[in-house]
Amino acid sequence: MGFSTMAGEDVRPDRLENLAAGLRFAARAIGQRYTPLLAQVVVTRRCNLACGYCNEYDDFSPPVPLKDLLARVDHLADLKTASITFTGGEPLLNPDLDKAVRHARKRGMIVTTITNGFRLTKEWIDRLNVAGLQGMQISIDNLEPDDISMKSLKSVEGKLELLSKHALFKVNVNSVLGVTGERTQDVITVAETAAKYGLQHSVGVLHDGSGLLKPLSPAQMQAYERVTQISPSMVHSLNYWLFQKNLMNGQGNDWKCRAGARYLYVTEDGRVHWCSQQRGYPNKALLDYTVEDIKREYHTEKGCAPTCTLSCVHQMSMFDRRRQAIADPTQAAKAGVGEGAPAPVS
Ligand code: SF4
Ligand code: SF4
């Protein structure tokens, strides 16, 4: 059974719809090559916080208008995009977030969002339930806010409780090891708190600001192990084997990043970039983005790949690991490699 609004309209997708969206994802991941598996769509660049390490926000941008968001969702659906994550800045600063979620569900995509959680209310959770949101990630870096990260457990523990009571979607709490060495133990407390509320937990790793690889300290390694015991999950195991193991030991990864193809990052002005950390390539309007663009970016090597910590891009690229890489030099040339793009890996 679906879910009825006051107007009697059945809007919340039922389990069969969720299953169908999951199967569509699997079919496109395994059976197709030039279809996006995940698009991260910025719904506003503005954020209500100002974390010291973040380069993904400002304090003034307006929300992306709903009609633009819906047009972007429609074009992504036409490209056969399997899933979409609405992000920011802070996505809850866009009052139409739930309408965009609902539209993307109607177009058959798996739909999630990433938030700092500060603006969550029961009303927002109810609206996102009704819209059919399937997953939410909340990032928590420390126990108390400090100069580097304002995303503290103290600030949002009440929101975790609210989510555990009312959310019909999956909630994942994500922490990052390596933000500051002094706060390593905080990650364990965050994982324990997430478990207390029945929420999933995952952990990311950072390399230093210059992009140089720095192995995790013994204390950080111990914290990582402890967290994976508190919250054993597929996500932990996957990230560990895909890329974290090498990075934690100060080694780069040899992999093909499929950003611009399997993964799209759509900025607030509606343009496609490789990812939040590599804005500028291919920098093309989403509404003009075609399968030819996807093919070109699929085969474009990214010089930043060895030290990349973006777990969602690693995950979306993993399905093609076993495919034979057909390097087409004309495609790479068109992509602008050697004209300001990061140097090829190999
Ligand atoms: S909450 Fe997220 S988007 Fe906002 S400043 Fe912090 S890291 Fe950046
Ligand atoms: S390797 Fe990582 S940083 Fe580089 S383009 Fe791909 S996702 Fe972005």
Image: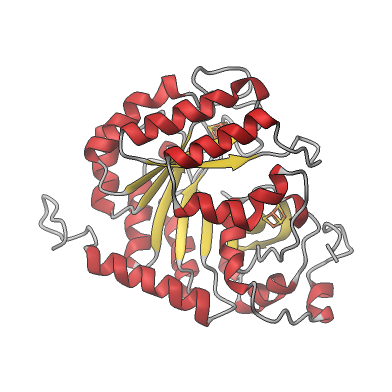
Query: Along the line of sight, which residue is nearer the eye, 329 or 161?
Result: 161
Q: Is residue 148 above or below residue 291?
A: above
Query: Along the line of sight, which residue is nearer the eye, 192 or 139?
Result: 192
The quadrant of the picture showing ligand 1 is top right
Q: Quadrant of residue 184?
A: top right
Q: Residue furthest right?
A: 338
Residue at horizontal 42 percent and vertical 21 percent from the top: 155
Q: Residue 240 location, x and y as percent? A: 59, 51
Residue at horizontal 49 percent and vertical 61 percent from the top: 72
Q: Quadrant of residue 126?
A: top left
Label tally: 0
Q: Is residue 240 above or below residue 36?
A: above
Residue 41 visible in the snapshot:
no
Where the N terminus falls, by quadrant? bottom left
Colour pattern of the rendering = secondary structure
Q: Is residue 111 left or right of residue 345?
A: left
Residue 243 visible in the snapshot:
yes
Q: Residue 194 location, x and y as percent? A: 38, 34
Q: Residue 29 location, x and y as percent? A: 51, 73
Q: Is residue 132 left or right of residue 274?
A: left
Q: Is residue 23 left or right of residue 79?
A: left
Residue at horizontal 34 percent and vertical 48 percent from the top: 170
Where the C terminus falls, by quadrant? bottom right
Query: Along the line of sight, which residue is nearer the eye, 71 or 16?
Result: 16
Query: Along the line of sight, which residue is nearer the eye, 112 or 143?
Result: 143
Q: Is residue 308 left or right of residue 339?
A: left
Residue at horizontal 66 percent and vertical 25 percent from the top: 180
